[in-house]
Image: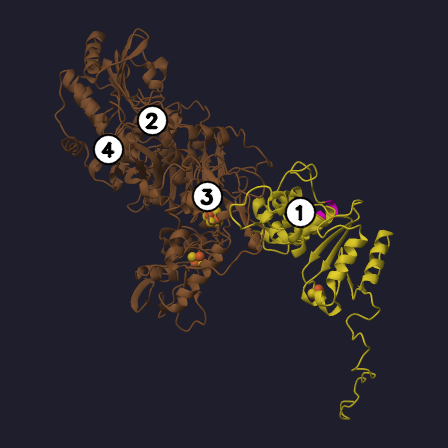
């Protein structure tokens, strides 16, 4: 895997990366091909008679934007390398003999730019005419209609007639099969190469490119192949025309029929910002929302395409088990049945267990914890292997379980050690940041854990706790690189707490961090990060949804499964009374005596805390189906019936309660860094609690085998099932495979 | 190139006639396929490797570039591969070059499809490339092309004779316009052609001989065909016409 990106680099306004590049390259004595050094000087120029000041190195198009002039464009995208091949962005610059492509032209001090002159208009018209000369006139049957840049811009900037009469016919290109997610209609392609640049730079799919030349140039992979990437859906958004559209969404809706709701994704713990597009009561599609601190402008395919799982396997009415069958019940009957079941089971104190699943929202976790505590129990369990015991890292200090470096901070790291994690599957969008920084700076990555294809090269250290010990002792080439790094970063996978050797590994790493605190723990840089992989986990830790030592050894008689669908059926005692609250009839519902239908993440307005500890507010896009209700209200209603009513009646007072527990839960949109002292204190308790742990040396395993099916929603999704078939199992799409290149053999 | 394009189009139009045409715009196909299709003679399972000689040459070529720009050697290496692989670049050649240069195979495919001199389909033993760009055309290149096609049994540009001996294509300017019209066989130029001399050249190849490359009209390189009009006298020797101290 080569680190070279074949492109002009992005202007310095990108921020962090630009700053890092020159220093790293100097230190490694290696030239960074893809980055220009950034200078912080500002320059001033005039656009349409208006003075603007932009950072030096900005493209002219950015300066025009800053001056409030809209420049039409197709190939330019501010998160991709500059190609300069569509020529739509032509502007007039004083003393330049011809119009210049503003995206490929650096802004020059004192330049006089005109974006609204007859020359510019004519240039745009001409470019438009050429672009349309080969573009099919199939807008009425094109899925991009209504949100097509070509359509919009030809209305705005194009001529009202054509001079081409297509004597030789229009260019015809055969469609490519990129897999079950991206539908292609290559006749419509205008060769902007945004998709190619995205695939190569961001997603790490180096198989996408352009073949042929001139009028015959086409986009594809030359050999027949699917686009095997977790981020492939983003090329649908990037494509300015209808050449790449979404297969699952094909012909389902027109953009002007859709209601947009800004919300938060829950398929992983990144909390990607999404926009849920719905029509009536159905979610039609999910799109990313830009947020530079979290997901930039990308989302993973699971985030984007698992929504059809919201339609299938839903629980719509309360169900009560009679004999071996579930029968429909009213809410009243179901809740009474639970109260009776609780009484009948005779559960007292810690025998009442609550299990928090992957998709439980923060409000409900708080309500459920309060209820269970009121009933005298501390038995708060997490739905993961080993979740019935208190986690290795205690939850007293936030920095012990959060992604402390923050997601954008990853780009500042110049050496990353991944321990027991495969970010590509656990946090696909974060992975693209690591790749970005690996491509453009001298980032060194090391991996301890199962070998995986990460889309960037890494030094493979090994697969068990012993390797961690070696690393900590400073043995090996990577340990040396790590020592030499300025901003070293350790990313610990969430599966480590579930592993038998987790205690030992945590102990070793915490000691390492403490010893090297001069570098790893400074007020500017926190180089110890835990990458959570499920949406509810950081919030659960934040509110202390973990069992006390005493409670974890008690055999439960009454179990409340809140969205818990990964439980091991064997861990549930036969005679226990089980309640399941959730939105899908998945594993948890099968184990239950009473099922309570709840709302999925697109149907409720709740708080989600991401792996950095950033709380964000999801919003309801559609109403919950049938008799299902918002989760926290169910818990509130139940509390009334079991005789210890919770003291909040509306979501505002519930959020007041959250504020009492931890103000960070309701400070939306921001992360709060743990102070260096607190982090150190946290590490000290971590070390004290884990000292003397035995290390068995069992190999670390990656927690996610099938990226496409990790939770009840994606398991119910047809699209995700197709992806599993096409990508994870590789069925039905195995054409012209050449031997896959050995991963990371040269990092 | 235009002829090839045209013939294909006619074919497509003929088969389509029975269907109702909703739009009047016909599809313009490109004259070569820019995607790969597995065939019995061209698929990634067919092994390809440089022979020891070529491997040595390849290493020499790679060593001309700085190590981080290894991939700059892709064009010469593809050419080397094409020469070793009977004049055409199969998918295996491309994959092998990609592996050798440690670059993603797609980057090699991009290069190989961009440059028309990489043949991505097998060609005959003698690769006849007739230039039909303006200067040659004005000097009767289409007559030459017709002669070649007829002489080779009525094949069309882009086709190979049944016995696999000859492939004919039209090419753009080869830079020998002063000796137009011309054609290229393999690496050799045959210039100043007439239909008769063209036939002779082909006949020689058919017999397994190798005709003398260069102008077929008997003139030397691109000297004036009507005989020299200037520079006819003996060139002055050293020191002639100089002031005495220099002579
Ligand atoms: S497919 Fe779309 S994004 Fe890709 S080059 Fe064509 S128009 Fe651009
Ligand atoms: S946007 Fe500038 S050339 Fe395409
Ligand atoms: S035009 Fe034929 S060689 Fe130049």
Decide if residue A463 is on the left or right side of residue B160. left
Decide if residue A213 is on the left or right side of residue A715. right
Q: Quadrant of the C terminus of chain B?
A: bottom right
Real-space Cα distance between discs 3 and 1? 28 Å
Query: Residue A168 location, x and y as percent?
Result: 58, 55
Q: Quadrant of residue B144?
A: bottom right
Near-viewer residue (A56 or A631): A631
Near-viewer residue (A42 or A530): A42
Q: Nearer the viewer, mark 1 or mark 4?
A: 1
Task: Give the magenta range.
Answer: B51-55
Crowd tier of the residue under label 3, counting other residues whose Cα lies within 10 Å: few below 14, some 14–19, many 20 or above: many
Q: Are labels 4 and 3 on one chain?
A: yes
Q: Nearer the viewer, mark 3 or mark 1?
A: 3
- The answer to whether residue A695 is above or below residue B206 is above
Question: Which chain is drawn using brown?
Answer: A
The chain holding disc 1 is B
Real-space Cα distance between discs 1 and 4? 58 Å
Query: Residue B107 location, x and y as percent?
Result: 57, 48
- The answer to whether residue A317 is above or below residue A164 is above
Real-space Cα distance between discs 2 and 3? 55 Å
Q: Quadrant of the N terminus of chain B?
A: bottom right
Element type at marker 3? strand
The chain holding disc 3 is A
């Amino acid at each position: 895997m080569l680190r070279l990106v074949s492109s002009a680099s992005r202007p310095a306004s990108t921020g962090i990366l630009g700053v890092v590049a020159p220093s790293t390259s100097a230190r490694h004595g290696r030239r960074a091909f893809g980055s220009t050094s950034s200078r912080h000087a500002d320059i001033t120029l005039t656009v349409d008679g208006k003075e603007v000041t932009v950072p030096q190195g900005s493209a002219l198009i950015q300066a025009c934007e800053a001056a409030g002039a809209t420049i039409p464009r197709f190939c330019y995208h501010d998160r991709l390398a500059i190609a300069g091949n569509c020529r739509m962005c032509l502007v007039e610059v004083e003393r330049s003999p011809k119009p210049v492509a503003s995206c490929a032209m650096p802004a020059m001090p004192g330049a006089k730019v005109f974006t609204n002159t007859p020359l510019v208009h004519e240039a745009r018209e001409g470019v438009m005419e050429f672009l349309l000369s080969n573009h099919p006139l199939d807008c009425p049957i094109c899925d991009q209609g209504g949100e097509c840049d070509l359509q919009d811009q030809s209305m705005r900037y194009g001529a009202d007639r054509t001079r081409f009469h297509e004597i030789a016919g229009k260019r015809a290109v055969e469609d490519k099969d990129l897999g079950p997610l991206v539908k292609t209609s290559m006749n419509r392609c205008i060769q902007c190469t945004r998709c190619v640049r995205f695939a190569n730079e961001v997603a790490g799919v180096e198989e996408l490119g352009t073949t042929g030349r001139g009028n015959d140039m086409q986009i594809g992979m030359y050999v027949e192949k699917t686009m095997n990437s977790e981020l492939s859906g983003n090329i649908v958004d990037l494509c300015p025309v209808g050449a790449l559209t979404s297969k699952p969404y094909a012909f389902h809706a027109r953009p002007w029929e859709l209601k947009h709701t800004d919300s938060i994704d829950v398929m992983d713990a990144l909390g990607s910002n999404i926009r849920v597009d719905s029509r009536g009561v159905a979610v039609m599609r999910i799109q990313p929302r830009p947020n530079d601190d979290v997901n930039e402008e990308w989302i993973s395919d699971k985030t984007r395409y698992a929504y059809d799982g919201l339609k299938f396997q839903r629980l719509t009415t309360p169900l009560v088990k009679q004999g071996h069958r579930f029968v429909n019940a009213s809410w009243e009957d179901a809740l009474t049945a639970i109260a009776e079941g609780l009484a009948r089971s005779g559960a007292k104190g810690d025998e009442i267990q609550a299990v928090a699943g992957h998709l439980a929202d923060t409000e409900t976790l708080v309500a459920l914890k309060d209820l269970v505590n009121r009933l005298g129990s501390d038995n708060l369990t997490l739905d993961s292997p080993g979740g019935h015991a208190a986690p290795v890292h205690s939850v007293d200090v936030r920095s012990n379980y959060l992604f402390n470096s923050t997601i954008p901070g990853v780009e500042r790291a110049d050496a990353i050690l991944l321990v027991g994690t495969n970010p590509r599957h656990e946090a696909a969008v974060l992975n693209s940041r690591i790749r970005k920084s690996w491509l453009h700076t001298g980032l060194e990555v090391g991996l301890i854990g199962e070998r995986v294809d990460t889309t960037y090269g890494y030094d493979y250290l090994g697969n068990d706790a012993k390797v961690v010990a070696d690393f900590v002792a400073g043995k090996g080439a990577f340990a040396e690189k790590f020592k030499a790094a300025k901003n070293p970063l350790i990313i610990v996978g969430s599966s480590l707490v579930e592993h038998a050797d987790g205690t030992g590994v945590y102990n070793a790493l915490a000691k390492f961090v403490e010893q090297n605190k001069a570098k790893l723990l400074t007020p500017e840089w926190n180089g110890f990060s835990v990458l959570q992989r499920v949406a509810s986990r950081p919030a659960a830790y934040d509110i202390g949804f973990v069992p006390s030592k005493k409670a974890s050894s008690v055999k439960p008689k009454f179990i409340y499964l809140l969205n818990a669908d990964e439980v091991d059926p064997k861990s549930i005692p036969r005679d226990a009374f089980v309640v399941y609250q959730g939105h899908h009839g998945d594993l948890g519902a099968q184990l239950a005596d009473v099922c309570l239908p709840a709302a999925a993440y697109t149907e409720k307005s709740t708080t989600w805390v991401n792996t950095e500890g950033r709380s964000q507010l999801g919003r309801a896009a559609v109403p919950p189906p049938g008799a299902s209700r918002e989760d926290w209200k169910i818990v509130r209603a139940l509390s009334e019936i079991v005789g210890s009513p919770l003291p909040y009646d509306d979501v505002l007072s519930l959020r007041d309660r959250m504020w009492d527990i931890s103000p960070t839960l309701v400070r939306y949109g921001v992360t709060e860094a743990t102070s260096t002292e607190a982090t150190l204190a946290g590490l000290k308790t971590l070390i004290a609690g884990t000292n003397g742990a035995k290390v068995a040396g069992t190999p670390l395993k990656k927690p996610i085998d099938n990226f496409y099916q990790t939770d009840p929603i994606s398991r119910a999704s047809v699209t995700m099932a197709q992806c599993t078939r096409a990508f994870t199992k590789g069925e039905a799409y195995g054409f012209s495979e050449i031997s896959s290149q050995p991963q990371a053999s040269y990092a | 190139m235009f002829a090839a394009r045209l013939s294909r189009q006619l074919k497509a139009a003929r088969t389509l006639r029975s269907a109702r045409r909703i739009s009047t715009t016909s599809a313009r196909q490109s004259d070569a396929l820019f995607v790969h299709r597995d065939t019995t003679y061209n698929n990634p399972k067919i092994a390809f490797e440089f022979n020891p000689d070529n491997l040595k040459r390849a290493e020499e070529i790679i060593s001309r570039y700085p190590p981080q720009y290894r991939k700059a050697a892709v064009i010469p290496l593809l050419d080397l591969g094409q020469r070793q692989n009977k004049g055409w670049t199969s998918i295996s050649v491309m994959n092998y070059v990609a592996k050798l240069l440690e670059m993603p195979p797609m980057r090699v495919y991009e290069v190989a499809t961009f440059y028309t001199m990489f043949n991505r389909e097998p060609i005959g033993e003698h690769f006849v490339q007739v230039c039909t760009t303006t200067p040659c055309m004005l000097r009767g290149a289409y007559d030459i092309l017709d002669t070649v096609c007829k002489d080779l049994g009525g094949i069309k540009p882009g086709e190979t004779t049944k016995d696999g001996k000859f492939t004919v294509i039209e090419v753009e300017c080869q830079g020998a316009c002063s000796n137009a019209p011309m054609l290229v066989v393999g690496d050799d130029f045959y210039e100043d052609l007439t239909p008769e001399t063209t036939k002779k050249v082909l006949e020689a190849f058919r017999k397994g001989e190798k005709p003398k490359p260069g102008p077929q009209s008997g003139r030397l390189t691109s000297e004036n065909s009507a005989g020299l009009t200037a520079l006819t006298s003996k060139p002055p020797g050293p020191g002639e016409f100089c002031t005495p101290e220099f002579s």
